[in-house]
Image: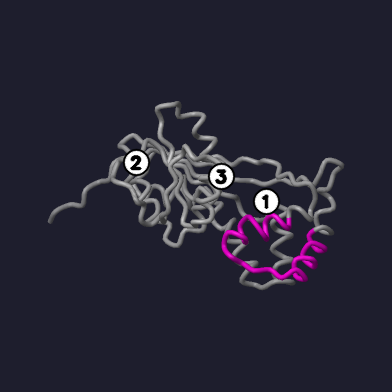
Amino acid sequence: MWPCGTGVVARHVTRHVGPEGRVVGLDVHPNMLAMARRMAPAIEWREGTAIELPFVAQEFNAVVCQQGFQFFTHQPQALREMHRVLIPEGRLALALWCPIDTSPGHYDLVQGLARHVSTEAATLMSKAFGLGEAEAISALLEEAGFRAIHVRQEERMARFPSPDDFTKVVVRAAVLGRMGVKVSDDALKALIVDVKAALQPYVYTDGCIFPMQALRTRTKRGHRALPSMQ
């Protein structure tokens, strides 16, 4: 699993691999790994980066990366590393958010960040939605040596108790929080006012509910063609 964060996906995977299976969670942030270890000590948690995975070749049957690939500094190298650690018939699963205009909550949040925090914070938030085109991710996977590439676009409903909670979660704990973006209390209050007003069409008696679209990608490792010797 990369990036594993607090280990939500890794814990879910353990229910599918069976008692003899091995699940490893990888993240670059020690604090996230410490939290993950407390919540699931039986899982193997490792610190490392996607562009230099701390594993030997062909060590895993599957690699899962949920909503992290778009943040990698060198995406082609990260895919080559995922390809390297998979067995010959191993599988890779990626989840990537579609363009930000398919998520009303995050679109409105980005506008508020630009007004009340900084253009840098708004750009960073937008980056989470920066690789949401099927053609782009398919091309990267093929270049890295993967085959049997299947990309499916899905829509799910994001649910939060209120627009206030949504804003606080993203700013303090989710994308921006993980990236170390500092938002003052005054800026957060102003941001909440803007997002709350913009998300009123999505506020119901049981909370704030808005659609989000994502790409679900499944592919096989494939075999690299050796360079010709001339």
Q: What residue type is labelled 2?
A: Leu
For mark 3, give the secondary structure.
strand
Q: Is the residue under label 1 in contact with that under label 2 (CB below 8 Å)?
A: no
| Image quarter of residue 52 | bottom left
Neighbour tally class for label 1: few under 14, some 14-19, many 20 plus, Cα within 10 Å: some
Foreground mark, 3 or 2, reads 2
Depth check: give the residue in front, 44 or 59: 44
Residue 95 covered by magenta stretch: no
Depth check: give the residue in front, 109 or 176: 176
User: How far separated are the C-alphas under marks 1 and 3?
Assistant: 12 Å
Q: In this view, does 209 lie to the left or right of 126?
A: right
Q: Which amino acid does label 1 sit on?
A: Thr
Q: Residue furthest right?
A: 205
User: How far separated are the C-alphas under marks 3 and 2?
Assistant: 22 Å
**Is 37 located above or below residue 177 in the figure?**
above
Q: Name the residue under label 1.
A: 102
| Image quarter of residue 119 | bottom right
Residue 22 position within the rendered picture, expressed as x and y whole percent measured from the top left: 40, 35
Assign the magenta stretch its main secondary structure. helix
Q: Name the residue under label 2.
A: 86
State which tag comes first along the sequence, 1 or 3. Answer: 1
Q: Mark 3 points at which residue?
A: 215
Q: Which residue lies furthest to the left in this view?
A: 230
Q: In this view, does 221 lie to the left or right of 25?
A: left
The boundaries of the magenta stretch are: 167-195
